[in-house]
Image (cartoon, rainbow, N blue to C red):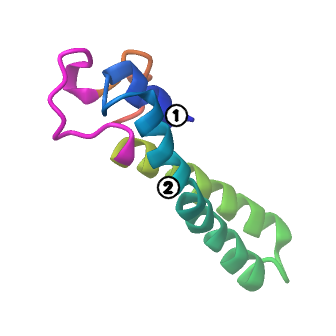
Amino acid sequence: MAIGRAWAACDVGVNAAANSMTLLFLAPVIWVAAAVPWVVLYGTLGRHHRGSAVAAGLVVTVCFTWFVVTWLGMPDSYPDPLCRGNVPPWWPGFIPA
């Protein structure tokens, strides 16, 4: 959702339908990539230290989400006059993009 909103705010792509189809095909790949660390953490840490596994999983998920949104959602090679530095105006300044 954040990637779609960033693309819409910065006017990236052909139109909303083309961007939605791209995200539709990327969503399963992103979901699998986000689920794999949880499976690995549950298999290794979860048996003995369930709280540590959940904490590590949350940290990995937040870092992965930040990476995907900034990598896919804010293309630095796309020339756009609407978003200064290809960062949407709603993106918080304290989070690096």
Q: Is residue 66 left or right of residue 41?
A: left
Q: Amino acid at mark 1?
A: Ala
Q: Position of residue 88 (x, y in %)?
A: 36, 22
> Which residue in the protein does label 1 denote?
2
Disc 1 and disc 2 in contact, CB within 8 angstroms: no
SS for callout 1: helix
Q: Position of residue 70 (x, y in %)?
A: 38, 42
> Which residue in the protein does label 2 denote?
26
Whether residue 49 is in magenta: the answer is no
Is tag 1's residue or tag 2's residue first in the polypeptide sequence?
1
Looking at the rendering, which quadrant does residue 28 occupy?
Answer: bottom right
**Cα gap from disc 1 to disc 2, whole angstroms:** 13 Å
**For the C terminus, which image quadrant?**
top left
Q: Nearer the viewer, mark 1 or mark 2?
A: 2
Name the residue rendered at 60%, 55% in the picture: 61
Q: Is residue 50 left or right of residue 97?
A: right
Residues rendered magenta in the picture: 72-86
Looking at the rendering, which quadrant does residue 82 occupy?
Answer: top left
How many numbered discs, if any?
A: 2
Q: Nearer the viewer, residue 55 or 4?
A: 4
SS for callout 2: helix
Q: Amino acid at mark 2?
A: Leu
Looking at the rendering, which quadrant does residue 60 occupy?
Answer: bottom right
**Residue 45, visible in the rendered structure:** yes
Q: Position of residue 2 (x, y in %)?
A: 52, 34
Name the residue rendered at 41%, 38% in the picture: 18
